Image: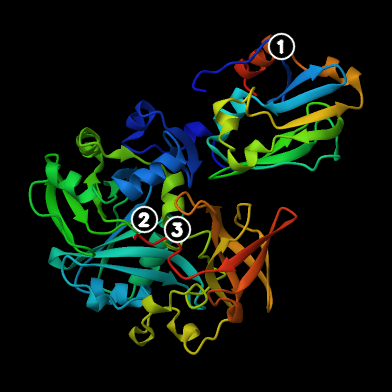
Amino acid sequence: MAEASYPEDLKYHSEHDWARVEGEQATFGITWYAQDALGEVVFFDPPEVGAQITKDEAYAEVESVKAVSDVFAPLSGEIVEVNEELADSPEKINEDPYGEGWMVKVMLSDASEVDSLLDADAYKELLQTGS
Amino acid sequence: MPPAADTLRRTPLHERHQQAGAKLVPFAGWEMPVQYEGIRQEHVAVRTDAGMFDVSHMGEIETSGPQAEELLQRVLSNDVTKIAERGAQYSLLCREDGGVLDDLFSYRLPGGRFLTVTNAANHERDLAWFREQAADFDVEVTDAAHEWAMLAVQGPRARSALERVTDGELPKRMRTADLPVAGVEALVCGTGYTGEEGCELLIPAAEAVRVWDALLAEGVRPAGLGARDTLRLEVCFHLYGNDLSEDRNPIEAGLGWCCKLDTGFIGSDALRGLEPQQTLAPFAFTGPGIPRQGNPVEAPHGEGVVTSGSLSPCLEVGIGMAYLPTEDAEPGTPIEVDVRGKPRAAEVREKPLYEKR
């Protein structure tokens, strides 16, 4: 995806992660800004299904040719699904960060945490002011 | 602390990098392009077509005077007397105890002059070392780093692209020639750091842009330091600061071939008869994962450490080089690399890891 975009229906974490909250579950991924900063993603190391993850802590790794980066959990919960497609096609994280590049689905343990996340405008402002 | 962005030095091609969409990063005190369109694309362009790297951050030391050869024979590990006029040679700069200070290319120019290319991070230290040793010789050691821009043009089409903008015949491998490139008088060297055909150009700094533009017009693609690193790693060329350091000697680094002990160079006494506990060996992952510098290694006869690691864009697996117990440096030896707590299966391989078919 060549152009920066930050969909209105997502919630954002300041470590450049997004969450699509649907009831008690949410889907996580990294933002356009994060994938652009990283460059071409060549390896995604997912957590195990069933793993407990904690808001603001690393739950997975993405690697470009040059570097490895942690992926931070925007919310806490239990991993119920990981995007298996990324094992063979990690470049989907670059090509479609909010769609086919999703990383995990999580059963949320504390829905009130959602209130601490940023909306698209607030996240864009964060990027403007320098993150 | 790395210096702030505004104190970083910029090469004469800085504006061209910005125009080409480079991602610029601090590197050894310089602001350098790490990539343009992407490391993988640039890597593939150099393997299949032609790419150019701005390596103007690298330093140059000129040694001249009646005893220039004698000084170099004393400080450099290789036999400098074997460099023909217009020839090139790889060597190491060692301390008395054999620790490696830098790895270098030296060119013998007409008139008994030598030009030695240094790594950016080591340039000042190398220069001080040369000058300290020069006290006993009738020589002049000059810091020429500010005079030159350096452009590495590499790939199967590099020479033909370069020929189209050069007046005269390009030098063969490990030879040099003074030739006008895009109308600019350049020192053209038949050397490189990618395992591909090509040349490295030393160009007066003020005129580097003309050469860059002419090569760009010939379809030579800008390539960044990211691709330079993956290209050299696939062919197992050492990188100072990763695979070479003051704490490692040339023998364990597998560079005994460029250490001619009989020349009496500084460090030669320490290296004589040395049988290293560890040896640098290339390896490839047999499963998922990407090794990185500093990852611990479990080998059949003991521990080791990864000094360079990356994904190989051509082989599409994790590759690297690691210091291993010497018994385990044999191709085929299974090893396990600890990548941030995850054990990853790997195997020692022959050098080079990537070879053109």
Numbered mark located on residue B146 in the image: none
Residue A88 percent across, percent down from the top left: 60, 42
* Residue sitting at the far bottom: B273
Observer-side mark, 1 or 3, equals: 1
**Pointer 3: what residue?**
B234
**Pointer 1: what residue?**
A9
Residue B54 lies in what quarter of the image? Answer: top left
Chain identity of mark 2: B
Observer-side mark, 2 or 3, equals: 3
Residue B133 lies in what quarter of the image? Answer: bottom left
Q: Residues within 10 Å of mark 1 (few under 14, many from 20)?
A: few
* Whether marks 1 and 3 lie on the same chain: no
Locate the N terminus of chain B and report the quarter of the image it occupies: top right
Residue A2 percent across, percent down from the top left: 49, 22
* SS under mark 1: loop
Q: Do the residues labelled 2 and 3 touch (CB within 8 Å)?
A: no
Residue A19 percent across, percent down from the top left: 75, 22
Residue A69 lies in what quarter of the image? Answer: top right
- For the residue pair B97 and B32, the one nearer the viewer reads as B32
Above or below, comparing residue A22 to residue B8 in the picture: above
Q: How crowded is mark 3: few (under 14 residues within 10 Å), some or many (20 or more)?
A: many
Question: Which residue is located at x 46 percent, y 51 percent?
Answer: B230
- For the residue pair A129 and B21, the one nearer the viewer reads as B21
User: Which amino acid lies under the numbered mark 3 shown in the image of this protein?
Assistant: Glu
Question: Which residue is located at x 80 percent, y 43 percent?
Answer: A48
Chain identity of mark 1: A
User: Which amino acid lies under the numbered mark 2 shown in the image of this protein?
Assistant: Thr
User: Which amino acid lies under the numbered mark 1 shown in the image of this protein?
Assistant: Asp
